[in-house]
């Protein structure tokens, strides 16, 4: 065991000691306060033992007040039937992807019920995580909202609930097609939001336009012109983003995937007079890695948003005691109950 692991273990034990002095933990609370759980609270509080213990204490009291351990799927039968909030599956890193399709009228009339639905869905996502996976992805479809302030209050409250009670759990959050005023409200509130850096605002119309352009003009990103002679073997790469012509001493038969940045090389005079590796152009030295755009960040999760909702598949992810009684009912009985529901 390394020195860093020893220090982490000491901090975890110190947090638990402070917590036990402040309150008497129940069996379920002791089970909740695992080493991994305490480590997440420490991580979000800069390894401060006192701050982590204070936040964990508040989280346990919140879980007890809202009744997290007593929530079941029977309480949200209507929402489960309509697909208001559900776990759509797991991404390539085995992280659960949570999808919310909250309507404006639902959030306005049933805000407290929405909070319970949010917590229930997050609990299903956490319990469905494979071993060694600690984070989930959130996709919030805001196209059903008409008011930007109403959606901002709902989303900001959801993010604050996650940061306070599910620290280090959110990998990325995507807001799809929000009202036009929401980006300005979100930008102004970012200094007060702990998870603002993991939130992306995405317009699905931009993705559709890009897909249509690729279908209409396939293979227009770059054109490769291989050429060879008795003295030189080079490949000319045509690129629209940089200067039009580049010469490379790379053998075109070895690889057809040539990047314009990697294809900068010698001129004819330099290649014939000197065999030394040329110095990289000044333009390349000034280039920096661009931050990940909202569109590029959302593309790996686009399939979860487009995937049709399947109630039975979602219920199969639930584990006791969240699954309730309806999850064991035959599918035909569930369909019959839906038809009878007014």
Image (cartoon, rainbow, N blue to C red):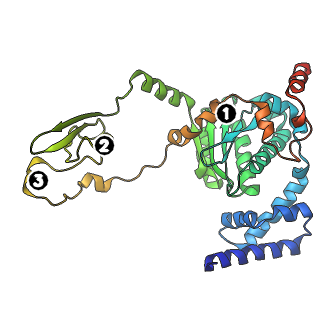
Q: Is mark 1 on a helix, strand or loop?
A: loop
31 and 45: which one is in front?
31
Residue where numbered disc 3 is placed: 270
Residue where numbered disc 2 is placed: 255
The C terminus sits in image quarter: top right
Decide: marks 2, 3 in contact (CB < 8 A)? Answer: no
Say which label, 2 or 3, has the lower sequence index. Answer: 2
49 and 310: which one is in front?
310
Say which label, 2 or 1, has the lower sequence index. Answer: 1
The N terminus sits in image quarter: bottom right
Horizontally, is 329 left or right of 95 in the view? right
Q: Where is residue 224 in the image (x, y as percent from the top left)?
A: 26, 35
Q: Where is residue 248 in the image (x, y as percent from the top left)?
A: 21, 46
Estimate the spatial distance between the alpha carbons at disc 2 and disc 3, rounded to whole Å.
Answer: 24 Å
Residue 142: which disc?
A: 1
Horizontally, is 219 left or right of 70 in the view? left
């Amino acid at each position: 065991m390394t020195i860093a692991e020893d220090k982490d273990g000491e901090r975890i034990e110190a947090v638990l000691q402070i917590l036990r002095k402040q309150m008497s933990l129940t069996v379920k609370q002791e089970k909740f306060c695992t080493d991994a759980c305490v480590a997440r609270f420490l991580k979000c509080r800069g390894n401060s033992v006192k701050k982590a213990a204070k936040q964990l204490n508040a989280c346990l009291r919140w879980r007890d007040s809202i009744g997290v351990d007593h929530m079941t799927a029977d309480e949200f039968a209507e929402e489960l039937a309509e697909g208001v909030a559900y776990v759509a599956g797991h991404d390539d890193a085995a992280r659960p992807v949570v999808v919310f399709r909250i309507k404006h009228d639902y959030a306005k009339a049933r805000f407290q019920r929405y909070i319970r639905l949010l917590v229930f869905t997050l609990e299903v996502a956490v319990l469905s995580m494979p071993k060694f996976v600690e984070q989930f992805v959130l996709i919030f479809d805001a196209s059903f909202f008409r008011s930007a302030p109403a959606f901002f209050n709902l989303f900001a409250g959801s993010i604050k609930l996650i940061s306070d009670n599910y620290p280090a759990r959110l990998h990325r959050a995507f807001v799809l097609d929000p009202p036009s005023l929401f980006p300005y409200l979100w930008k102004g509130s970012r200094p007060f939001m702990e998870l603002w850096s993991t939130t992306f605002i995405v317009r699905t119309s931009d993705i559709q336009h890009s897909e249509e352009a690729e279908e209409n003009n396939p293979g227009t990103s770059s054109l490769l012109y291989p050429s060879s002679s008795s003295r030189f073997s080079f490949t000319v790469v045509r690129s629209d983003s940089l200067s039009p012509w580049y010469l490379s001493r790379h053998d075109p038969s070895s690889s057809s995937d040539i990047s314009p940045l990697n294809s900068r090389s010698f001129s004819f005079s330099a290649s014939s007079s000197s065999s030394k590796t040329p110095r990289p152009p000044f333009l390349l030295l000034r280039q920096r890695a661009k931050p990940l755009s909202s569109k590029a960040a959302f593309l790996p999760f686009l399939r979860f948003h487009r995937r049709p909702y399947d109630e039975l598949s979602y219920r199969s992810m639930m584990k006791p005691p969240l699954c309730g009684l309806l999850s064991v009912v035959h599918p035909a009985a569930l369909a019959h109950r839906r038809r009878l529901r007014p």
